[in-house]
Amino acid sequence: MGTKTVDETGVKTDDEKTVKAEEEATTDQTVGEAGEAEDAAADTDDDTAPQAAAGGAVEKEGSTGVGQGAAAVVSAGLGIVSLTGSWVGTVASARESLIGQLETSSSSNVGTLIEKGYGDAWHATALWGGAFALVALIVGVVVLARPAFGAPGRPQAPWIKSVSWAGVALGVIGLLLAVLKYTDVLLGLPSTG
């Protein structure tokens, strides 16, 4: 059987009972600490859930600015294309030049040759430049007007406004140049007589 010992309180106890009691106390303490840890983790999860939801909302709100920023960059890019020329404008110009050459014969007068061979090609380039400028202008204006129809009180990022204004300005300049080229006010065809 077990030996008798005196515990801290001065009561005689069996060694086996004391060891079992100490093990149970340790187990109870461990279970209690584990329960407190679980409660703390649950509290932390409850606290971070709204923060995570708020973070998701922030990300979702931030994504609306991405579309506006992309549209602003597209507007500025189209404005630059309207000024420098595009592949589509070059192909249309070459096509009009070829058609003009096919329609005229060697016996045609010089004015007809210039008009059909170069004038129509110049006008095709001006039309495509004007089309790109108009699209740049429209996209830029839509981006600038978007906050008025979107979330009120949420300001538009300054860089988006700047790039949009650049797109609008390039679109206006490109449209003006396209009209001047098409009407032969700017770099018109030479007169033949």
Image (tube, rainbow, N blue to C red):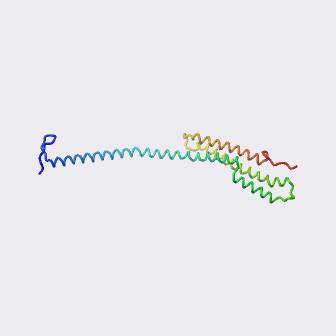
Numbered marks: total: 0
Q: Nearer the viewer, residue 132 or 16?
A: 16
The residue located at (56%, 46%) in the rendering is 66
The residue located at (12%, 50%) in the rendering is 2
Q: Nearer the viewer, residue 54 or 187?
A: 187
Q: In the image, 153: left or right of 108? A: left
Q: Nearer the viewer, residue 172 or 76?
A: 76
Q: Nearer the viewer, residue 63 or 22?
A: 22
Q: Find residue 85 and report its horizontal and vertical position in percent.
A: 70, 49
The residue located at (73%, 45%) in the rendering is 177
Q: Find residue 154 and report its horizontal and vertical position in percent.
A: 54, 41
Q: Find residue 99 and report its horizontal and vertical position in percent.
A: 78, 58
Q: In the image, 48: left or right of 73? A: left
Q: Find residue 60 and report its horizontal and vertical position in percent.
A: 51, 47
